[in-house]
Image (cartoon, rainbow, N blue to C red):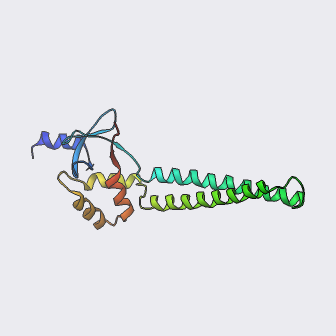
Amino acid sequence: MSAPARASLNAAHLAFCSTCRGVLPFDAAREGLVCRRCQTVHRMVDPGALSRRRSARYAIYAAVCGTLLILMALGVAALGADHPLVTRQDLFMAVCLGGIAMGCAARSAALRWDSAGFERLEPHELADLRRRLCPGMIRTDVVDELSRRGWRAGKIRTVLMSLAPRPD
């Protein structure tokens, strides 16, 4: 390989293109990174971040419904079950709040479980990744190289899924 070609490869970002299914040079662009082979614009993402954010949101919903349920129970306990302000509607609302709280907690756990397949990459791992990737590697080459280096499956999945095509 000639010196100018090697210099242009070093100036470009090497990453796994999910469209071309290989490690290719990328050019930096205003919108993200552009694959030199297929001209697809990609953006760097954390593939598990969306599931983690949604999981946190459902956990908050479950906490709010659970708190309202506890406050209703405390109100009924303070007034007494035979008080005229305690009606069947209150009992129905308590059952609904309990169901919503349990459903939101289950959904939060399921979303957290989905995001557990991806791990965040540390800066030293990103630097190691830049040294290990070379043009022409395909998905299995990337997996083999990183697993030989002791990378866990979640980190390898994150590397392979971190470049997402930019939605138009």
In the image, residue 10 above or below residue 144? above
Residue 118 lies left or right of residue 74; in this view the side is left
Q: Nearer the viewer, residue 39 or 137?
A: 39
Residue 58 place in picture, x, y as percent: 58, 53
Quarter holding the C terminus? top left
Residue at the far front: name it: 88
Q: Position of residue 137 (x, y in %)?
A: 19, 55
* Residue 107 placement, left or right of 123: right
Q: Which quarter of the figure has residue 138? A: bottom left
Side (left or right) of 140 relative to 162 = left
Measured from the top left, where is residue 54 in percent x and y? 52, 51
The residue shown at (33%, 52%) is: 127
At horizontal 56% and vertical 53% (from top left) the residue drawn is 56
Query: How many numbered markers are drawn?
Result: 0
* Side of 15 where 59 appears, left or right: right
Q: Quadrant of residue 2?
A: top left
Q: Nearer the viewer, residue 102 or 165?
A: 102
Quadrant assignment, res 165:
top left
Work out whether residue 93 or residue 13 is closer to the camera in this orientation and state it: 93
The residue depicted at 73 percent of the width and 57 percent of the height is: 92
Most extreme residue toward the top is 30
Residue at image coords 20%, 40%: 36
Residue 75 on image: x %, y %: 84, 55
